[in-house]
Image (cartoon, helix red, strand yellow):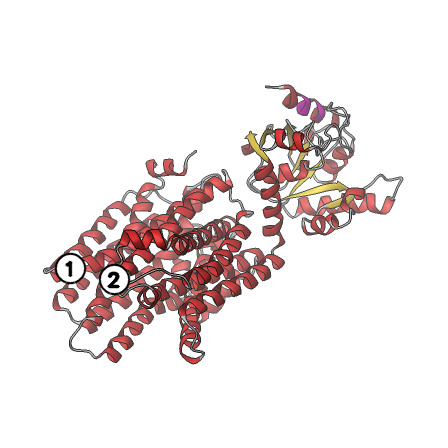
């Protein structure tokens, strides 16, 4: 299903419109205020600079203070009603904001900006906590991609609209009316958001912001993968805030002081973010694909480094036209767009991962913790930029180069701590690059809880193919001889595979394998075994061993029969022989992964499972 089909559905469209209009209005108001400050004859340049930074601080400070309380409210109460109340409050704020714009009272405008930040701090947790309740695991990543696209295009639109309106003769009246109309439209659209039931109605609200911040951060650390994903998202905002802040001066110092070049760079950056978000679904399929996260991190560093070198050769002069500039500086613009695209590919699956793997009873509080850390990293990005530009006197291109290099180090740290990202990347590269995988019936694999997957064993890459097709992490039971292969054994250890051998070869390893399978199932994981016990040498299905019966007797869980079709005869099977011609012919060949309905534990026998898998193989 195309991600754009979500925009035709009531479960998503009103929500999408509501959040996009909110982002547009925030940036329209904020940037119009900044323009009033900068071009005010009342303040000197020094005072204007101070006020600009005060404005930025006033908007972001409530995210530290109030996001944790907003997270509690979103966990305790029905979310669509909360959004309606918040949009109603926003409408009231914008009425006051319109009066402040009309008076052009900077103190009043700053107070309204702070209150807007407070409203946004409450809105953030409920917005992202609502999505997993309205979207299935198949559409969660697509929904996040559309929200990311809509948010950045709204940010761009609000920024550009503020500049356009400010140049108009009746700018005060137009801006005052527009912020009110947009906020009212956002309130109307919120009325159509479907209900999303409270996840923790018994929660007792802690209204002390300081103690709740500590508690919220503590909650985010309960799941290490979620916590490190939050840190990775916060790093994305560190990078993004640095670029968005420095691009105006980058354009002014290196290109031209004409504002249209600032607009051009901001547009390229924002469009890249939006397009990258849309590409995520194409790269991922119908599940949250963590394998593209390293791809995004790699792109940020590669294109960030090349942007530095491209900026050393920018072609410009006072009389250059926009067409001439675009033609002469394609490399620099492509670097900027591909860098921001990579940022989206990095952050969209991370956001979806947090929503998917957070405990439902305090999901909104975890998202609030994410917002707190995001805001902290954005402040740190400003401090870092000030230190590098003023104390160390580095140029803006050099600052961006340093950020790109640090990004590589941060990515390596995160990936070393969450090996699942690297594993999924390897699986994604092998399966998506070498093959085209068609999947059928994968909705039979439960989204939560323990289950055993069983499948025919056709090649040396069967585990990778099943791992790529599954929306959930899978632990594989693997022959000890394969699990101990040089170099590959480190990969298998990262993947937490369970080595096994015959009872005769090693009773200890044999017993330990069954104990590990039992523990994994008790912990709620998916475990995959190949009941044939060996790779087929003829393409025909071998008899299933009775080990599966032992597993289900010890831990009664559903068993999902699966079949791999089209892989026999490839270079990874016993029939295939490597040659350049064969590799070319089978490059991007189509494979099929089929899953049948789960078999209840009380009905599991090796012969029954073998029959089901055989039928899956022969069925067209």
Residue drawn at (52%, 55%) of the image: 297
Q: Nearer the viewer, residue 244 or 135?
A: 244
Q: Is 106 situated left or right of 399 in this image?
A: left
- What span is in magenta? 610-614
Category of crowding for the residue at label 2, using alpha-carbon neighbours closer than 10 angstroms: few (below 14), some (14–19), many (at least 20): few
Depth check, front residue: 293 or 68: 293
Question: Residue 389 at what x, y percent from top left?
Answer: 41, 75
Q: Is residue 613 magenta?
A: yes
Quarter assignment of residue 46 = bottom left
The residue indicated by pointer 1 is 176
Q: Is residue 282 above or below residue 51?
A: above
Side of 190 where 575 appears, left or right? right
Type of secondary structure dominating the magenta stretch:
helix
Q: Secondary structure at mark 1?
A: helix
CA gap, disc 1 and disc 2 = 24 Å
Instruction: Answer yes or no: is residue 112 visible.
Output: yes
State the residue at coordinates (64%, 26%).
566
Please tell me whether mark 2 sits on a helix, a strand or a loop. Answer: helix
In the depicted view, which residue is nearer to us: 223 or 256? 256
Q: Position of residue 38 (x, y in %)?
A: 22, 71
Q: Quadrant of the N terminus?
A: top left
Position of residue 38 in the picture relative to residue 380 (left or right): left
Quick one: which residue is furthest to the right in this view?
A: 504
Q: Residues within 10 Å of mark 1 (few under 14, many from 20)?
A: many
Marks 1 and 2: CB-CB under 8 Å? no
């Amino acid at each position: 299903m195309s991600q754009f089909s979500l925009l035709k559905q009531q479960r998503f469209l009103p929500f999408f419109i509501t959040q996009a209009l909110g982002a547009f209005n925030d940036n329209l108001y904020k940037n119009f205020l900044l323009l009033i400050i900068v071009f005010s004859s009342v303040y000197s340049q020094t005072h204007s600079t101070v006020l600009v930074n005060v404005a930025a601080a006033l908007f972001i400070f409530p995210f530290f203070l109030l996001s944790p309380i907003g997270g509690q409210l979103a966990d305790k109460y029905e979310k669509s009603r909360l959004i309606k109340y918040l949009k109603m409050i926003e409408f009231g704020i914008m009425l006051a904001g319109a009066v402040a714009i009309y008076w052009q009272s900077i103190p009043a405008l700053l107070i309204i900006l702070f209150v807007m930040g407070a409203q946004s701090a409450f809105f953030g947790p409920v917005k992202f906590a609502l999505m997993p309740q309205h979207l299935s695991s198949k559409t969660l990543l697509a929904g996040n991609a559309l929200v990311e696209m809509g948010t950045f295009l709204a940010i761009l639109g609000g920024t550009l609209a503020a500049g356009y309106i400010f140049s108009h003769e009746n700018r005060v009246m137009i801006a005052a009316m527009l912020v009110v109309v947009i906020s009212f439209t956002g309130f109307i659209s919120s009325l159509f958001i479907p209900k999303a039931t409270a996840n923790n109605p018994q929660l007792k609200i802690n209204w002390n912001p300081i103690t709740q911040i500590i508690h919220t951060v503590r909650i985010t650390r309960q799941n290490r993968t979620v916590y490190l994903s939050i840190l990775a998202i916060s790093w994305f905002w560190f990078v993004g805030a640095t670029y968005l802040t420095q691009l105006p001066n980058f354009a002014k110092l290196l290109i031209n002081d004409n504002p249209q070049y600032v607009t051009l760079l901001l547009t390229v950056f924002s469009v890249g973010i939006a397009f990258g978000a849309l590409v995520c679904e194409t790269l991922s399929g119908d599940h949250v694909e963590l394998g593209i996260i390293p791809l995004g991190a790699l792109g940020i560093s590669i294109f960030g480094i090349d942007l530095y070198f491209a900026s050393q050769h920018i072609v410009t002069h006072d009389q250059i036209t926009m067409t001439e500039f675009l033609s002469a500086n394609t490399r620099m613009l492509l670097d900027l767009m591909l860098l921001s695209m990579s940022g989206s590919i990095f952050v969209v699956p991370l956001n979806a991962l947090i929503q998917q793997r957070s405990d439902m009873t305090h999901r909104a509080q975890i998202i609030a913790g994410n917002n707190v850390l995001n805001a902290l990293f954005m402040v740190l990005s400003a401090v870092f930029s000030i230190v590098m530009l003023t104390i160390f006197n580095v140029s803006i291109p050099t600052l961006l180069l340093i950020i790109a290099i640090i990004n590589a180090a941060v990515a390596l740290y995160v990936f070393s701590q969450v090996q699942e990202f690297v594993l999924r990347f390897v699986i994604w590269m092998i399966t998506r690059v070498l093959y085209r995988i068609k999947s059928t019936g994968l909705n039979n694999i439960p989204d939560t809880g323990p289950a055993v997957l069983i499948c025919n064993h056709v090649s040396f890459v069967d585990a990778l193919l099943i791992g790529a097709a599954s929306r959930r992490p899978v632990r594989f039971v693997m022959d000890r001889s394969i699990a101990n292969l040089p170099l590959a054994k480190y990969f298998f250890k990262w993947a937490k595979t369970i080595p096994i051998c015959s009872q005769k070869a090693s009773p200890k390893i044999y017993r330990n394998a069954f104990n590990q399978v039992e523990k994994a199932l008790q912990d709620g994981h998916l475990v995959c075994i190949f009941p044939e016990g060996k790779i087929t040498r003829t393409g025909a299905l071998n008899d299933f061993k009775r080990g599966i019966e032992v597993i289900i007797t010890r831990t009664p869980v559903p068993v999902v029969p699966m079949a791999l079709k089209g892989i026999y005869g490839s270079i990874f099977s016993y029939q295939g022989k490597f040659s350049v011609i064969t590799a070319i012919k089978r490059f991007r060949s189509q494979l099929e992964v089929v899953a049948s309905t789960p078999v209840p534990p009380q009905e599991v026998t090796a012969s029954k499972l073998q029959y089901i898998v055989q039928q899956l193989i022969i069925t067209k």
